[in-house]
Amino acid sequence: MMQDTKNNTQLISKERIPTLKFSKNDVLQDADAKSRRYYAANRATILGNTYRNKSMITFKTASGEIKCVEAALWGFDKDFVLLKSGMFLPLCAILEINYC
C-alpha cells in the first residue's frame, strides 16, 4: 500500500476492493461528469480487452477516503466495472479513470 502525498490518494491492490464499503450515492453530481465517467469506463474496457492496457481508477469509499487502483477493465454496466481479477467496483464510487 502506497500513499501519494501530492493529492493524498492511497494506491491499493485490487485484491483489497472486496474489503471496502461503498455508498449507494453517486460521488459525481454533475450529469456531464457522469457521462464522461461512463465514456472513460467504456474506453478503458476496450483498451483492457484489446491491448491488455491498465487504467488508474480513482474512487471514494463510504467513509470518504479517496483511493486508487491500477487494473485492466474487462467489462462494465450502469452499476459496476469488472476488473481483470474478477473484482467488481461500483461505478457510482468512481471519481475518474485515467489510462496508463
Image: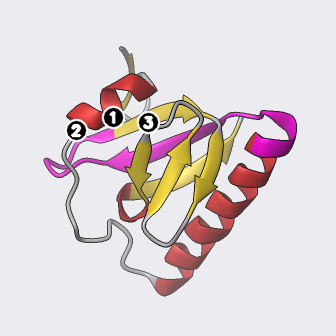
**In the displayed structure image, the side of residue 38 where residue 10 appears, left or right:** left
Q: Earlier in the sequence, mark 3 or mark 1?
A: 1
Rounded to the nearest whole Å, what is the CA distance between mark 2 and mark 1?
Answer: 5 Å
Region of the chain picked out in magenta, as a range: 49-66
Q: Amino acid at mark 1?
A: Ile
Q: Is residue 85 magenta?
A: no
Q: Residues within 10 Å of mark 1 (few under 14, many from 20)?
A: some
On screen, residue 88 versus residue 56, left or right, reads: left
Q: Secondary structure at mark 2?
A: loop
Q: Is residue 66 above or below residue 2?
A: below
Q: From mark 3 to mark 1, how far is it between C-alphas?
A: 10 Å
Tell me where residue 8 appears, x and y as whole percent: 34, 32
Calculate the distance from the C-alpha at mark 3 to the C-alpha at mark 2: 12 Å
Is residue 21 visible in the rendered image? The answer is: yes
Tell me the quadrant of the picture where the C terminus can be found: top right
- Dots 2 and 1: beta carbons under 8 Å? yes
How many discs appear?
A: 3
**Residue 5 seen in the current view:** no
- The color scheme shown is secondary structure
Rendering coords of residue 83 (x, y %): 54, 40
Task: Please state which amino acid type lies under the numbered disc 3.
Answer: Cys
